[in-house]
């Protein structure tokens, strides 16, 4: 057992979140919170809890949209600007149960979209997606689901076909310990910002990245950052900053590999033994297929980085224990498959794949559970049951699905058809945070018969719903905190009473299941506490099997924290393949690293051919939108979660999210530090406060995601977001016909100083509620 927080320690109770293990207590009506003492680098995001717990933005009771209540289900443009009516729990269960039964009987469960993408909260039992999927399977017979993620929409489809399973590459390959001990040079495209690795889904007890970079640096490891933002690597890395043009990394990588080839520095022995299709790619690289050699001069023209800098970098990498990092952000863009694939080719040409601290560390540093070790025992997992509906969409195609039912689209070599959806049910996600082109999303949601949302706060998604069910926040219930890559299991004690009439997602679904005749099948007769004990048993049995101390559930619960054994840091499949490629082939079609993929080539999709290519982009600066907008992850919160909490609010300026831009770009527009600016393009506009800083590349403005969508006038079709949500500006297209991933990281905009009266922030005020 680990020491630290026990439940009787001055009233502090153990708990955890996606952003860190902590303990908390209620004192004089306020929340007191302190980070896990064993965390070397605690995350400030836990500071959002105290202000959020009892904030007016919480939802106090079940609410039904007035228009829906009066007119019944059906398409309605008023979603997002209508009033709400408070109803009792009994009434709302009756209404929603009836509506679910209607849709199922008339159209079948294939008319229900239950993908419900989102990060929800930590905790293995009250995990909202597990709960909703289990409910829809058990009580309705299934639902149309979504596949892949907004995080890695392109890479998670591509990597298994050309290299290895996604988890294998991100979690069993190059670790932080290996980097600290072995790496000579880290070349990080998109960086490894500490703000990002501060977060890990499920739970995280130790933030190790800063320390690992410090140790590597002290040993003499060099860090090179290719990114529009200097802050994408911390000071500890002492990185050299190469500020390339966003969206052009593939060209830069090609320029490096071309240099390696012409200077005889490419590792030919590695390419021959371990890869498939290099000769095909080499002809393209040398310009034999299209007359354009992809040399450093060519790459310079595209990236804005001097050719001799690219050549020097190639020479510096060759023969070293080099690791290539490509962040998730690079693939969350048009043709996002290409930098992921080309990063692998660069690592292969350097011949370091499979060596400790070398090769291809895709997405290392993007999230705190990458580059760690796996637990040697399984964690608690709630069974989701069987989904009787086979249909799915790639997750980021939601607006297309709702706006263009019955039409076809390409995905992973297939031609598929969008289903006819009548009802959308969301718990644990916020599409008005995560999706692109929010004005288009509003039109898509207007088409539905019914939108149902479980939420703890009045997000824009809740405001657009017909039926809003208030759920508890993690601090208001008991759970078990566990992540497969964190050695600490946490008994998440309840710290506060539920807000208003909020209930656990589990309790809501149990009552709805009863209304649909499936209570017993859904609950299996267990209370929430009984479920925790039941789910814990998997881990206890795993410990006992290994002859390790295996405390009972009651002992674990009282102790609060439990240290779990972990598997060795052995380089996984990549190391085994390197050691013996015949005995341990990769799981790709050829068993090798696929620089050329016959399978992907066979799809015939021009926007993702059989090997990495440079493709011109649609979203490039133009006179009406001359600046790149980088819409990246926020430092002060997880996505949109608890945006109304103190840590997030304190970092805003005059209530607005802060955008960063280069002094020359600001000056050319008469914008000063601290001014409010309007960012706009053909899709929409938002306000943001401007920080003027030379740590942003010229030609780029950065505005993080996560400020709650706050239209100045919700009745307008395209209203100004007064708060700073960049997704009113981003374009709603897939990365390519291959993966159809989210492309929200980059777009182009114009920026002007905002004159006139500053509209108030209303995002955190509950909508108007009326009695009927
Ligand atoms: N432009 C642009 N857009 C992006 C990105 C980008 O880089 N640029 N990044 C994308 C990425 S990588 C991701 S992962 C997505 C993230 O998108 P989401 O995961 O949808 O964002 P969150 O804000 O985490 O949404 C979780 C919601 O669940 C609610 N919640 C928390 N706990 C519970 C609970 O116990 N029960 C219920 N019912 N609800 C709960 C929270 O209040 C919150 O509203 O955004 C994507 N969007
Ligand atoms: N604090 C915090 N941490 C988080 C999250 C959060 O919401 N808050 N979300 C988590 C989630 S779900 C995910 S998936 C990961 C996401 O991990 P990422 O997608 O990697 O994170 P981002 O911050 O969006 O992007 C990283 C950096 O890439 C750079 N970049 C953008 N475009 C380009 C480009 O074209 N070329 C190059 N070279 N660089 C570019 C930007 O400067 C940006 O800061 O983060 C996780 N960590
Ligand atoms: Mo993500």
Image (tube, rainbow, N blue to C red):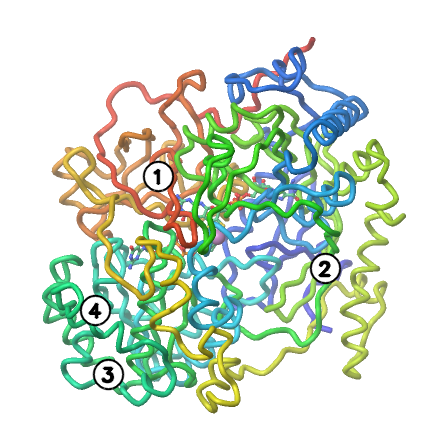
The image's mark for residue 560 is none
**Which quadrant does the N terminus fall into?**
bottom right
Give how far apart the Cα atoms at labels 2 and 4 are: 47 Å
* Of labels 2 and 4, the one closer to you: 4
Residue 27, image x and y in percent? 69, 44
Do residues under tags 2 and 4 come within 8 Å of each other at their CB atoms?
Answer: no
Name the residue that disc number 3 marks.
266
> Closer to the camera, 623 or 493?
623
Quarter where residue 618 is shown: top left
As helix, strand or loop, the secondary structure at mark 3 comes to: loop
Q: How many marks?
A: 4
Mark positioned earlier in the residue sequence (4 or 3) = 3
The image's mark for residue 730 is 1
* Of labels 4 and 1, the one closer to you: 4
Name the residue that disc number 2 marks.
381
**Which quadrant does the C terminus fall into?**
top right
Name the residue that disc number 4 marks.
284
> Closer to the camera, 296 or 705?
296
Give how far apart the Cα atoms at labels 1 and 3 are: 39 Å
Give how far apart the Cα atoms at labels 4 and 3 are: 16 Å
Query: Mark 4, residues whose alpha carbon is within 10 Å: few (<14), some, or many (≥20)?
Result: some
Residue shown at the point (69%, 74%) measured from the top left: 564
């Amino acid at each position: 057992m680990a020491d630290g927080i026990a439940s009787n320690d001055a009233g502090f109770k153990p708990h955890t979140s996606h952003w860190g293990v902590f303990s908390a207590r209620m004192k004089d009506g306020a929340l007191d919170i302190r980070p896990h003492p064993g965390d070397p680098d605690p995350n400030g995001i836990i500071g959002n809890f105290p202000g959020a717990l009892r904030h007016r933005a919480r939802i106090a009771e079940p609410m039904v949209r007035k228009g829906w209540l009066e007119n019944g289900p059906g398409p309605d443009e008023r979603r997002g600007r209508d009033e709400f009516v408070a109803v009792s729990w009994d009434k709302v269960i009756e209404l929603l149960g009836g509506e679910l039964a209607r849709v199922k009987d008339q159209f079948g469960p294939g008319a229900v979209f239950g993908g419900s993408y989102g990060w929800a909260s930590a905790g293995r039992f009250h995990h909202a997606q597990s709960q909703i999927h289990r409910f829809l399977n058990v009580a309705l017979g299934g639902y149309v689901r979504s596949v892949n993620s907004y995080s890695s929409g392109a890479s998670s489809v591509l990597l298994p076909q050309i290299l290895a399973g996604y988890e294998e590459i991100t979690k069993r390959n190059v670790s932080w310990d290996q980097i600290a001990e072995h790496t000579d040079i880290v070349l990080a495209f998109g960086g490894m910002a500490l703000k990002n690795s501060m977060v890990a889904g499920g739970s995280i007890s130790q933030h190790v990245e800063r320390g690992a970079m410090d140790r590597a640096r002290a040993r003499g490891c060099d860090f090179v950052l290719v990114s529009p933002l200097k802050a994408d690597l911390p000071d500890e890395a002492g990185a050299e900053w190469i500020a390339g043009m966003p969206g052009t990394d593939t060209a830069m990588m090609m320029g490096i590999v071309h240099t390696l080839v012409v200077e005889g520095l490419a590792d030919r022995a590695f390419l021959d033994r371990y890869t498939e299709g290099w000769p095909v790619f080499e002809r393209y690289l040398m310009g034999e297929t299209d007359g354009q050699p992809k040399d450093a001069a060519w790459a310079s023209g595209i990236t804005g980085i001097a050719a001799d800098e690219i050549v020097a970098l190639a020479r510096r990498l060759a023969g070293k224990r080099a690791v290539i990092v490509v962040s998730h952000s690079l693939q969350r863009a048009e043709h996002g498959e290409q930098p992921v694939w080309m990063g692998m080719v660069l690592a292969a040409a350097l011949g370091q794949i499979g060596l400790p601290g070398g090769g291809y560390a895709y997405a290392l540093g993007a999230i705190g559970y990458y580059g760690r070790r796996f637990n040697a025992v399984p964690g608690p997992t709630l069974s989701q049951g069987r989904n009787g509906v086979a249909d799915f969409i790639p997750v980021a195609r939601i607006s297309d699905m709702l706006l263009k039912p019955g039409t076809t689209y390409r995905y992973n070599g297939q031609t598929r058809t969008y289903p006819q959806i009548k009802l959308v049910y969301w718990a644990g996600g916020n599409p008005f945070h995560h999706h692109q082109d929010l004005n288009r999303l509003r039109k898509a949601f207007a088409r539905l018969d019914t939108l149902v949302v479980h939420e703890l706060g009045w997000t824009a998604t809740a405001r657009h719903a017909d039926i809003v069910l208030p759920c508890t926040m993690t601090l208001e219930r008991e759970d078990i905190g566990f992540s497969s890559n964190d050695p600490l299991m946490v008994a998440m004690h309840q710290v506060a009473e539920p807000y208003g009439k909020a209930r656990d997602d589990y309790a809501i679904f149990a009552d709805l299941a009863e209304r649909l005749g499936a209570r017993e099948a859904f609950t299996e007769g267990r209370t929430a506490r009984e479920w925790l004990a039941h789910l814990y048993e998997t881990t206890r049995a795993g410990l006992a099997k290994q002859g390790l101390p295996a405390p009972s559930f009651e002992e674990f619960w009282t102790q609060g924290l439990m240290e779990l054994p972990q598997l060795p840091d052995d380089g996984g499949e990549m190391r085994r393949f390197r050691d013996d490629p015949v005995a341990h082939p990769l799981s790709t079609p050829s068993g090798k690293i696929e620089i050329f993929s016959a399978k992907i080539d066979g799809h015939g999709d021009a926007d993702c051919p059989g090997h990495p290519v440079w493709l011109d982009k649609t979203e490039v600066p133009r006179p009406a939108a001359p600046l790149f907008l980088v819409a990246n992850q926020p430092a002060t919160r997880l996505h949109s979660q608890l945006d109304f909490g103190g840590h997030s609010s304190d970092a805003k300026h005059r209530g607005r999210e802060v955008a960063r831009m280069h002094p020359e770009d600001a000056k050319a527009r008469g914008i000063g530090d601290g001014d409010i600016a309007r960012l706009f393009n053909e899709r929409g506009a938002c306000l943001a406060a401007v920080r003027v800083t030379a740590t942003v590349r010229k030609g780029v403005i950065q505005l993080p995601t996560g400020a709650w969508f706050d239209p100045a006038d919700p009745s307008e079709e395209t209203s100004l977001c007064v708060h700073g949500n960049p997704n009113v500006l981003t374009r709603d297209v897939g990365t390519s016909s291959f993966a159809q991933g989210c492309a929200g990281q980059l777009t182009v905009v114009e920026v002007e100083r905002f004159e006139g009266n500053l509209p108030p922030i209303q995002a955190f005020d509950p909508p108007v509620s009326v009695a009927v």
